[in-house]
């Protein structure tokens, strides 16, 4: 299961409300790359793909492909507002290592 904190849910709701195109939810995936081996990818999506797991959390739909779901299972996603900048953070129990920016893991 992937969990979004209330702050992350609010950020996603705001992004969906301001989207130029109809949006069905948030797509979260993991791609090869980044400085630690895998990088987190997020973006708004119109609908789920045929192989996606759909997670509905407090009315926000999250779409995750099968491979990414295995790597993200148990992850908590937060949205942090700080002086250094605002953005999503990932607390992934499957990550054996992470880069300093928090956007990739190994």
Image (cartoon, rainbow, N blue to C red):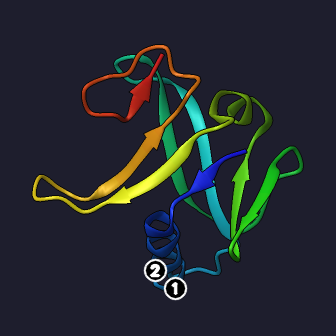
In the figure, residue 83 lies in which quadrant? bottom left
Question: Residue 82: which quarter of the image?
Answer: bottom left
Q: Is residue 64 above or below residue 32?
A: below
Write the residue at 73% across / 44% down. Answer: 1
x and y percentages locating residue 35 in the rendered image: 34, 19
Residue at 70% of width from left, 77% of height from top? 59
Q: Is residue 98 left or right of residue 81?
A: right
Q: Nearer the viewer, residue 24 or 58?
A: 58
Horizontally, is 67 left or right of 86 in the view? right
Residue 3 in the image: above or below residue 71? below
Residue at label 1? 17
Badge 2 density bin: few <14, some 14–19, many ≥20, Cα 10 Å: few
What is the crowding at mark 1: few (fewer than 14 residues within 10 Å), some, or many (at least 20)? few
Answer with left or right where residue 73 lies relative to residue 43.
Answer: right
Question: Can you give x and y, in whole percent of width and height, for residue 25 in the image?
Answer: 66, 68
Q: Secondary structure at mark 1?
A: helix
Residue under pointer 2: 14
Do callouts 1 and 2 mark residues in contact (Cβ within 8 Å)?
yes
**Helix, strand or loop status at disc 2:** helix
């Amino acid at each position: 299961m992937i969990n979004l904190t209330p702050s992350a849910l609010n950020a996603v709701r705001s992004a969906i409300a301001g989207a130029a195109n109809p949006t069905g939810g948030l797509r979260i995936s993991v791609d090869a790359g980044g400085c630690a081996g895998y990088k987190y990818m997020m973006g708004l999506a119109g609908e789920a793909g045929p192989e996606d797991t759909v997670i509905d959390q407090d009315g926000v739909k999250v779409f995750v492909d099968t491979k990414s779901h295995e790597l993200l299972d148990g992850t908590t996603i937060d949205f942090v507002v700080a002086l250094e900048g605002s953005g999503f953070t990932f607390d992934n129990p499957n990550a054996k290592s992470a880069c300093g920016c928090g956007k990739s893991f190994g």
